[in-house]
Image (cartoon, coloured by chain):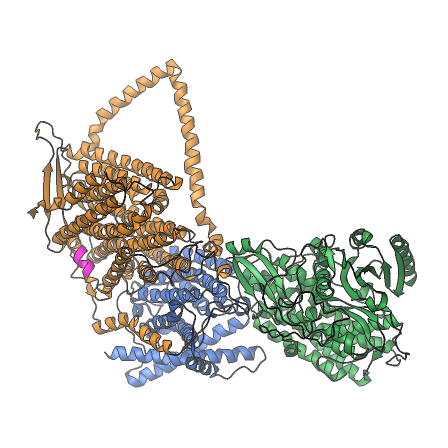
Amino acid sequence: MIRIIFALINVLIALIIAPLFDGIERKIKARLQNRRGPPILQTIYDLGKLYRKENIFLGSRLHFITPIIVFSNIFIALLIIPTFIPVSIYFIGDIILLLYLLSSSSLFLVLGSISSRNPFAITGSNREIMLSIGSKLLLALSIGVIVWNKGSLLITRLFPLVPPLVPSSILSFIVFIIIAYIESMRLPFDIPEAEPEIAGGILIEYSGPNLALILHSIYLKRILFASLIINFLFYGSILFPGYLGILIYSIIFLALLFIVSIVFTVIEVFCGRYRIDHALKFIKNLSLLMGVIILLALYGY
Amino acid sequence: MHSTVISKCKELIELLNRYGRVIEIHDGALLIEVDEYYLHELSELLHWKLNGYYTTSIGVDERPLNGSFGVYHAFVLDDYGYYVILYIKVSTGLLKTTSITPVIPGANWAEREIMDFLGIRFIDHPEPYRLILPFDWPDGIYPLRKDFPYNCKASVKDKIDEVVHGSTSTVKDVEELSSRYTLVPIGPYHPALHEPEYFELYVDGEKIIDARYKGFMVHRGMEKLAESRLTYNQIPFLAERICGICGFTHNTAYCQAVENAAGIDVPERALFIRSLLLELERIHSHLLWFGVAFHLLGFDTGFMITWRLREDIMNIAELLTGNRKTYGMNLIGGVRRDVKEENIEYIKRVLKNLENEFRDYMENIFSMNELVKRTKEIGILSKEDARKLCVLGPHARASGLKTDVRKYHPYAAYKYVDFRVPVRDEGDVLARLLVRYEEILESINIINQLLDNLPNTPLQAEYDGIPEKRLGVGVTEAPRGEDFHFVITGRDNKVYRWRPRAPSYNNLQSVPLMLRGEYLADAPIIIASIDPCFSCTDHVIVVDVRNGTRKRLSLNRILG
Amino acid sequence: MIEGDIVFLPMIPLIIASIITVSFRGKISNYITSISSMISCALMLYVSYKVLILNQVIRSSIRIGPELPSIPLNFLSIRFLIDSLSGIFIFILGLVGFLASLYSISYMSRFYDKEHLGFYGFNYMVFLLSMYLTLTTRDLFWFIIFWEIMTLSSQFLVSFEKEKRRAVWAGYKYFTITKAGSEVLIIGILLLIIFYCGMNTDFLVLRYVMKPGKLLNNIIIALLFIGLAVKASLTPFHTWLPDAHPEAPSHVSALLSGVMIKVPIYMMFRLYYFFFRPSLLWGIIVSVMGIITVLIGAFYALIQEDSKRLLAYSSIENIGIIILGLGVSLSFLSINNISYNVLGAIALFASLYHVVNHAIYKSLLFMVAGSIYYRTGSRDLDVLGGLSKYMPLTALAAIIGILSITGIPPFNGFTSKWLLYSSTIGSGTPYVIMGILLLFTGGITIAVYIKFYTTIFTRPPKKPYTMEIKESPPTITLPLISLAILCILFGLFPIIPWYIIGDFIQRIYPLRSYIGIYPGLIIVPTISIAFPFLLLLVLASIIFPLLFAIYLGYRKSISITWASGILYKSSPMSVSSRSYYNVFRTIFSEVYSIGDTLYNIFILKTSSALRKLFEAIYYVIENPPYMIILFLLLILLNYIILWEGWYIID
């Protein structure tokens, strides 16, 4: 029972931390471009403002309902991975549930966006689907190798990565980091949302609370992937006993999240945007590489 | 150089004499009054055979002067260093004349404009649709005629037709297109555009099949205003506001046109100062354009960097003229303010820093693989198409056409400085980027030369009023291409006809051609690569028309 | 075990009605067909209830000729056996058949004046009858006969619209390919007869009769498997399905996709688990064929522009999943290790669960496509669009079907796919690769169905409709809604499918003690887990959104789609289905050109090779000396075979 409470606390912290981190990222980006940038709490202010605005209904119920479904999918996904407090709700095979929740959140986002009938939204959704198929393949491949090497489908048993110190695990972890970057809607992969090109893409017809929910889901997804990366590296190695130990752990976790976030931001500053076919070629090449890694894994390396 | 020019001029005059009476209206410009019959032949001769190019057409209501309408077609002959203007009288009764668009596709818009504003019909024009007047402007009222007062409100038509009509000559049937492909509207409000214009793209998934352009949404009615209300010396200030980024070139071109018409000799120091400011404006405009291009490619960091560099230029401008933009320095016959000695060192130092930093950044940026991949072999305009559509400026130079007003028809102080004209052959977006990059470096070079050699003369010429009924042509090389101003002087210190033609007018016609077959994601960068300045293009006449659906805004104030 | 004449119950309405209905042409014939099929299918459900729930095994036989003990041929009496395996498939047949027949009452009204409905009705009922008989007979000989009748009658159903060239051609292609498959099947059966059972082709005689490892057995199994694979449309034999299924009337497509391609699956289960034993070799072969089928089906479904063709390719993909599960279970159950056996049993459960699930949601989707065809007259995705306003019930059913087939929790598709993932990825064997590829195709399936749903229901049509569109009549929407409800039920309460399938599985391996079945999820193997949480998890994904959506709905304002400042024009601005994913197609063009490459290799080259062979034969025939030599060689060959052949049997 207490596990459920802790898991919920995890998610609630993540809900607040996600926009805060986005604000920090914007500040860092600005500084790197010789600007001052907005205040750190700006994203929280933006989300708060959006939640209070009115919603706009375009005549399509699907379009109207999907943001909350997207949000709740990511919400549930956060429940099953350990983040700030190293407990989560787990059961056999939950890594697959995690992957399905992620794909179902993409599915609903795209469904809702296409239902708005806007040609920009449809173009953006097409790109999002194609990108997500590609990253799904990569994700399946890299998670598959890690599962093979660790021998379990249970998420908590997959962390940390290292006890079988094999090259294939490490290589697929590196690919996983790249996937985390692709899924986090950052340049060079923010193709579905490309603002100058298609005027907002999948987000174009959303406003008010719906837009807030989708943006919040995007930020939460970043936290989710970053948490997975940190868990792969450090899970279980910095535990201290008692409630104080949990507090220390969550502070350290927060700091590590911060570092991951900064690293990604710095990469983002120096990149232009990919066109969709370049991005797909990139993913295709990466998956061929993953094929080689799988062979390595099968042979025990 | 002068003697070869004279002999070439004699050759030219002999050639042209067969077609009609040739007058030299001033140094570097010839006028031939021709009959409609010779129009095609002559156009072909001038545009294709003599390696010149068509630049624009102007329609004038000359009924108070000689009882008919006049249509002037202007051609530029780089090899001879001359402008040749064909003048055709159109009778009031028939109101029609031959179109040269079948021979020169680039004349499409100019002729339609004359159709809209003066009511002259062009026979054989492939697309005789409305270009500039809005869809609810009533038929039969032609704003540029002398009997239409500038402050009259025309009543709006009751029936509102289809919004999109008026197209370029490269479009297939709309019905068929929209039933098979998707219509993606870029504009009038779109984050990729700075000013309202409308590109209608027909896409198949991510590939663009065809494109249509409908612009002219930023009309401000400057020509009519200038004719009706403003004096010669007030017009420069109006001309400067044609565009926020390239205002000073319009300004200078107009002054040159009037000075040429009236035969006024501008003192040398003024010429040097004019060139200095023109080059500053060029650097500033190109840096701005780089920022926009990077932003459209998704590379926001580049955007921030180039705009920061631009701040230095604007500071220099403020030092010299008192304003960061919209300098307000020109008058007929000279400039208003001087360049102080103590500022010259400062300017040179700032420019040197700028050059180093800029070069550094650009070398880094051009080695970024993903930016190069997004600009190489995208939006190609071949040399023949560029010729046919008469594109100008860096756009033309990136497609292999060697044309630069500063070199071939030197004006202001350009005959005293030495510089290169960068030309590239590929014709893609990367070529346009590189051409502008090199132009910035050349401009810095020119400014240094100018500052080193400032002559000591007065700043303004003395003259006794401006004679009427004279024609004048003033041309400058704006950052975007050749800026062509045509002036007919009038009475009471007013112009009779003023026709500014911005370079984007010609360049925009090539956009639909370049967009075909490209990816949708590349559309904004292709459109932006010609450096469109829609406010320059759209300044043409519109009287105050109340239009309930759209408010006309010029976003240039925000940019400047 | 009951000597049950109950077996015959479902047959009676069909036999009687099929004879009556031929004499009518129009409406009456349709009603006779539909209603008697409904009665018959309800009876089939009753039979399956008895078998599955009440755990009875029913045997019976019927004699159609005099008993002649001197002729050891069995074709004078047809013997029946319904055990737990057949029960599953009869359940599907009854369910889908019932709803399809209900559907056809309104649906066929489109054709009242155009086609001879009596002929259709006859074929329809013979089709149902033959499927039932194929599933219940326990005699290989009669099995083949009913199998052929099934093919024949369904072929007439496929080319139902006689005027359309495409339909006739599709039927022809279907028939020829499956007939070729049945020939292979017959050769296999002949070998079985020769070497194992003689003229007594009863299943019980053949039980476990083949031992693994012998070359002869492998040949027989290969032949039988190929014959069945053709009918089940596994790659590379799947080419008839994308042509045949779209052309048939929609409820027939539902039956074809939902039930008929499961009949060979049934026989495969019989083959591998009844006549043979699980073996590693065959497990690998079967699962490799399965995964290739999955990939081909998914990739090709992505580029289709015809709604039913898209569904047909998706059926191919799902059959691949079922076969993959079968293969995995064969491999794991053949290894002598408990944890592998458990995984194998899970894969078996997944496979059969998927059979049931697929029957439900594929028939749902085909009926949705049919409902749309009924109202708009079109299947072309480029023409359709914007229907969710006019046909809300159909749209709702479609959404549920799509969520199920793409495997979104908590619908039924998720559970069966999830079981398969657990058994492959969690196995620690090279099967992990197959699990990964399966995950990948899960992503592609999502894209496929997004295209399906959005081109039909949400985006506006390219040209406005010329006819008035409203919701379909209740006899069409009722089956849709019932199937949708079943999807939700089977997903939320996996204990229900367990009741259907579990009996068979328990006989193969006692799986129930290893897995926990909870609402919404099946936990494998058991681990202590807060049961309330699972409920929370599943409900949270439905109720929480609904509540919030209602809240959101209070503060809303109405507006229209923004189109960059100009007026939104629905027709030109909507995206045609061809434009979907075309970048994907260019990047993965290698996959899509496989068909052409294989055509080049197999068809063109083999046909030229065959031509050379025929030319050689003609040459020989025209030259007597060569003929004599050939003749002598043939005699020698026969002698060798007959002499040496006996050694192989040992």
Residue B279 drawn at (x, y percent): 76, 73
Give left or right: position of A89 versus B544: left
Query: How many numbered marks appear?
Result: 0
Apparent colour of chain C:
orange
Give left or right: position of C374 versus C19: right
Would you identify the image quadrant in which residue B404 lies?
bottom right
The green-coloured chain is labelled: B
Residue B531 drawn at (x, y percent): 66, 67
Give left or right: position of B196 versus C398: right
Give left or right: position of B551 versus A114: right
Would you identify the image quadrant in which residue B291 lies?
bottom right
From what the image shows, is residue C66 above or below residue B544? above
Q: Can residue B397 be seen at all in this image of the molecule?
A: no
| Camera-nearest residue between B220 and B453 | B220
Locate the C terminus of chain C and report the quarter of the image it occupies: top left
Q: Can residue C251 be seen at all in this image of the molecule?
A: yes
| Camera-nearest residue between C7 and B40 | B40
In the image as oriented, which residue stretches furthest toward the top? C624
Apparent colour of chain A:
blue
Residue C530 drawn at (x, y percent): 22, 73
Main SS class of the magenta portion in the image: helix
Residue C352 drawn at (x, y percent): 23, 53
Is residue C103 shown in magenta? no
Q: Magenta stretch?
A: C496-500
